[in-house]
Amino acid sequence: MDIEEKIEAYYSKTQKFKSGIAQLREITLKTELVETLKWGSPVYTINNKNVLGILAFKNYFGLWFFNGVFLSDPKGVLVNAQEGKTKSMRHWKFKSELDIDEVVVLSYIEEAIANQKKGLEIKPSQKTKIVIPKLLKDVLLENPGLNEQFNTLAPYKQRDYCEYIAEAKQQKTKESRLEKIIPMISKGKGLNDKYK
């Protein structure tokens, strides 16, 4: 199945908000955006840069503006994707296709396109220094081979392991996570390699 067929399958799938996402698609296709598929959902791009996505969930559907933080949002409809984590993405959620005002939706999309053409985007910030949790540090000090293997990992892989241990609330969880990652580190694998 090619991309176009997958997109058509997405929009023709029987679901609660089928007509709502179809309406958003119709509005979006009136612009110069190019329709493609990323992460299993329709994404609309300009110059190969993501501008927006159209998604449906159990209780709502909507537009995902990848750099929505730069939109003026005169109607006050945009919400942060994940408060405290997401820096630029903003969502516009709809409960019904009756909530869709084509003129307003089109104005938001056109502004998003203009912002992308201007190159407005938030650059990823540099991560702070890696802090190795005491539990992991002790194991690395006791095992020079494991320590050497850990130090050959890319900094982001080291950070993933450190955060994985540090984010656990209970000591028991920290210890079980440590047991899980020791074999992975010794094989030179990152925590999330299986997802790549």
Image (cartoon, rainbow, N blue to C red):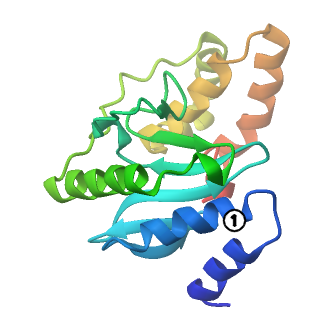
Horizontal placement of 74 versus 164: left or right?
left
Residue positioned most to the bottom: 1
Secondary element type, mark 1: helix
Horizontal placement of 93 versus 168: left or right?
left
Q: Is residue 189 visible?
A: no
Q: In which quadrant of the rendered view does residue 23 lie?
A: bottom right
Residue positioned most to the left: 118
Name the residue located 30 percent from the left edge and 31 percent from the top edge.
126
Say which of 28 and 121 sits in front.
Answer: 28
Name the residue located 60 percent from the left edge and 60 percent from the top edge.
196
Q: Amino acid at mark 1?
A: Ser
Residue 47 on image: x %, y %: 26, 71
Residue 45 on image: x %, y %: 37, 67
Q: In which quadrant of the rendered view does residue 95 lie?
A: top right
Mark 1 = which residue?
19
Say which of 56 and 185 sits in front.
Answer: 56
Name the residue located 68 percent from the left edge and 73 percent from the top edge.
11
Say which of 72 and 133 sits in front.
Answer: 72
Name the residue located 58 percent from the left edge and 50 percent from the top edge.
62
Mark 1: few, some, or many residues within 10 Å (few <14, many ≥20)?
A: some
Horizontal placement of 137 versus 76: left or right?
right
Give the vertical position of 141 relative to 159 (above or below). Answer: above
The N terminus sits in image quarter: bottom right
Residue 81 on image: x %, y %: 53, 35
Q: In which quadrant of the rendered view does residue 124 lie?
A: top left
Q: Is residue 174 visible?
A: yes
